[in-house]
Image (cartoon, rainbow, N blue to C red):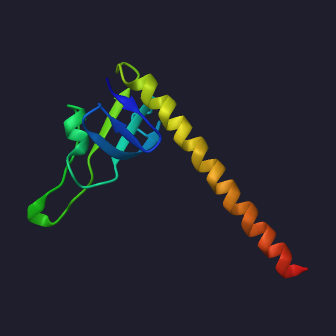
Amino acid sequence: MIKFMKHFVTDGQNKAKIHYSIDGHCSGKPCITLYSKDYGYDLDKIFENVENNSDGQTDYFEKSRVRFFEDSPYYTDARNAAIKAQEAWKEHYNKIQSKRNRKSLKLVS
């Protein structure tokens, strides 16, 4: 069973650190893209349709990614985890901004 968490995905044996992208496909179709945070093959161990267009001859390396469209059985779980990750990021960002605002008010006073 594959579990989608805020910062990683796991199948119980393998764990891949990831970040999500929501609905960013050029076709305009709703999709979730999982990007690996590492250059390894952790996503390949969990999913079959992983993309990685690295080219060692030209020193072009990219991290692996996998996309889920609405017809995928993983789409709903991946989308829910992506939304949770996005909300957690917004909360973190707002905390940082409020600290900065308090510091700038102290400097002005």
Left or right: 42 as drawn, with respect to 71 = left
Farthest residue, direction front = 13
Residue at figure coordinates x 30%, y 38% from the top left: 66
Answer with the quarter of the image where residue 33 lies.
top left
Query: 59 and 105: which one is in front?
Result: 105
Left or right: 85 as drawn, with respect to 7 = right
Q: Position of residue 34 (x, y in %)?
A: 37, 41
* Quarter of the figure that contains the C terminus: bottom right
Residue at figure coordinates x 24%, y 55% from the top left: 39
Left or right: 39 as drawn, with respect to 73 = left
* Quarter of the figure that contains the N terminus: top left
Q: Is residue 77 above or below residue 36?
A: above
Q: Position of residue 61 (x, y in %)?
A: 21, 59
Callout count: 0
Query: 51 and 3: which one is in front?
Result: 3
Can residue 29 be seen in this snapshot? no
Q: Is residue 48 above or below residue 108?
A: above
Q: Position of residue 29 (x, y in %)?
A: 43, 29
Q: Position of residue 72 (x, y in %)?
A: 34, 21
Left or right: 44 as drawn, with respect to 20 = left
Answer with the quarter of the image where residue 5 lies.
top left
Can residue 34 be seen in this snapshot? yes
